[in-house]
Structures are given as structure tokens and as C-alpha cells.
Image (tube, rainbow, N blue to C red):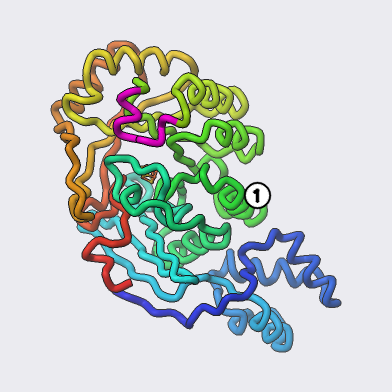
Amino acid sequence: MLITLKKYTPMQNILNFHKAELENWFIERNFTKYRASQVLDAIYKQNIFDFQEMTTIPIELRNILQNEFSILEIDSYEHIISEDSTSKILCKLSNNKAVECVLIPNDKDGNFTLCLSTQEGCKLNCKFCATGKLGFISNLTSSEIITQYLLTKKLSKSKVSNIVLMGMGDPLDNFENVLKALNILINEQKQIGKNRITLSTAGFSQNIINLADSKIGVKLAFSLHSAIQIKRELIIPSANKWKLPELIKALEYYYISTKKPITFEYILFAGFNNLDEDILALKKITSRFPCKINLIQYHNIEFTGHKSELIPANLNEILEFQAKLKKYSINVFIRKSAGEDINAACGQLALNNKKSSKI
Ligand code: SF4
């Protein structure tokens, strides 16, 4: 279903403002700073995205706000629901930017996990990822990241209980904007706890350290996919910028600073990264600090027109690999896939597949 919203006009986006900045904005115009809390409460607590609907604010002030600020930066969005109830939301943002985010129902509590995008496209060009095939288009602003959250929160009938920054782009390649969005959502607007947010990266060792030093305290997942440098570079060409020893040191620093175990993501390819040498390399890395490995099934990206030479491991091969790792007392899990039929599963976000053509 394609929904077209009121045309976005480029103004200052209020979601980009820290609360203190907005309070100053009101004070400078001779309004009480309490108006900032009223506006932010309307947006974050009541899901009101039109200043004219904020009835706690005097009409004159609503008119001023409407002329000065935008709220959601969306021209239109399309909501596609999968057979397993996962839904993909394709957002056409301002300046013709477009991104996808995914709502995944949780098994246990009926709530949702929201997978957010942080860039339009991606520089890293991972061989198994549809987003990588787009190349890099742009960084999302913090307000564009928050916009995805607010829209999906309104669309989902249940609570968004977890957020994963695992959509389009590498969050640590857009560090400042991502950190600002997280600060606003976690610390200023108390939308979600830091322990319920996982940020996933495939490199950027210095920004792993910077993230630890920022004290934002979210959980960290690392897209490893091979613990052997040469193999890793074959599937993640840009991995040649960050050698594994340097990355593992940065991850160890993250663990020591935050006391949060690291998650390693590992897509299993038959005959490539499921060999005995891979198990030994994983054993070495995972012995450094508390961590777990999530084994992920490879998802088809042929809808993008790119045929991959990588052969997906089948379920038996994944189970066998898991059993071998367990013999070394490694915490290893098989991550369930969601939304493959609507190209919303891990590595499938691409903007240009058939079902997103309306945007
Ligand atoms: S897997 Fe992540 S880091 Fe790699 S190309 Fe895709 S979005 Fe970028």
C-alpha cells in the first residue's frame, strides 16, 4: 500500500534538535522553555506529526512552528507485509532520498524489533548484500534516522521493544548523525533503553573505539563472516582497510569499556567459510573476550540483477558447523530469518526490487 503524505518542504527539522537547543529556541523568542517539552511530548509520546494537531500549544505558536519547522521528512511510504508478519517500510524521504526499514515481530512477547537504515546505499560493497550493490548514495541525517523510528512506531500496532541498526549502510560510517539520533532516542526522549539497541558494523575500528568512549552503551554486533583476513576481503572488499588484529583490539576495547559481550555475525557459505581452518580462526578470536556467534543463512539477492558465486550453506551444513564450534565451548546460535519473501531479510534491502517500484 503506497501512502502519500503532505509534500515535505525543506525547513529546519525539529527532530534534529537536542532538547536544550529547542528550549533555547523558545526562550530566544520570549516563550517559556516548557513549550519545548510540550512539542517533544506530542511528537514522541502521542505520535503527533502535525503542529496544528498539538492542542496544548496556543494556535499562534502552532502557526509559527509550522512555518519554521518540519517534523517527519517523508514524502510517501510503502508498507509491505510478509507471510511471516515481518513488514518492510520503504520511505521516500526529502531530497529524493529513499531508504528501507523492517519491522520484525518478536516470538515471545508480541512486540517488534525495528531494523533501521543509517545510510542510503553503502560504501562497503559486501558481495552478499543487495545494499552494497547500490554503492554509496548519501548519509542519513539524525532526523532521517529518527523519522524511520517514529513512522514505524506509529504503524506497528504493538510496541517497538528493540532496535537494530542493521538496515542499509554501516552506522559507523555515519558516526556523528547516528550517535546524535541514539542520544535523542535513548537519553533525551527515553524511547528505548540502551540495552535494547544493537549497532552492527563491518569495519571502522577507530569509530568502534569512539563509540565505546561516547558512553552511549548500546550492544555491538560485528559482521565478521570470516576470521581469516584474505577470505574476509574476498567477500567484503573494503575489509582491506581494517586488518583483523586491529579490529579485534577495538572490539576488545569496546567490551572492556561497556562490559557488553560482542556478537559476531557470520553468514555461512558452503565450501568457503565453513572449513576446519575457519573453526580454528574463530576459536582464536572468540577466546579474547565474552562474545557469541550468530550463524546466518545467506539470502538470495538475484532480484537486484547480480548473480552471486557464493553458495549458501544448507541447514545441515549450518547445524554441523554449529556443532563443531560448540565442541570448543563457543557460544553459537543460528539466527532465524524473517521477511525473505518480501526481500526484507538480512542483506536484501535494495530499494530497487520489483515490489518497491512504486517509490
Ligand atoms: S552488509 Fe552492511 S556493510 Fe556490507 S554492504 Fe551491506 S549494508 Fe553495507
State the residue at coordinates (46%, 69%): 93
Residue 23 located within the stretch drawn in magenta: no
State the residue at coordinates (62%, 75%): 11
Q: Quadrant of residue 218?
A: top right
Near mark 1 (Cα within 10 A), the count class, few <14, some 14-19 or many ≥20, is some
The quadrant of the picture occupied by the C terminus is bottom left
Residue 234 located within the stretch drawn in magenta: yes
Where residue 168 appears, as percent x and y from the top left, is 40, 51
State the residue at coordinates (71%, 60%): 19
Where residue 257 appears, as percent x and y from the top left, is 62, 26
**Does residue 113 appear in the picture of this structure?**
no
Q: Nearer the viewer, residue 119 or 164?
A: 119
Q: Nearer the viewer, residue 287 or 186?
A: 287
**Apparent side of residue 102 relative to residue 262 in the rendered image (left or right):** left
Where residue 26 appears, as percent x and y from the top left, is 79, 72
**Apparent side of residue 345 relative to residue 263 in the rendered image (left or right):** left
Q: Which residue is disc 1 drawn over?
A: 187
Residue numbers of the magenta segment: 230-240
- The image quadrant where one finds ligand 1 is top left
Q: Nearer the viewer, residue 19 or 232?
A: 232
| Residue type pointed to by label 1 | Asn
Q: Is residue 344 above or below residue 327?
A: below
**Does residue 350 appear in the picture of this structure?**
yes
Q: Quadrant of residue 152?
A: bottom left
Under circle 1, the secondary element is: helix
Q: Quadrant of residue 244?
A: top left
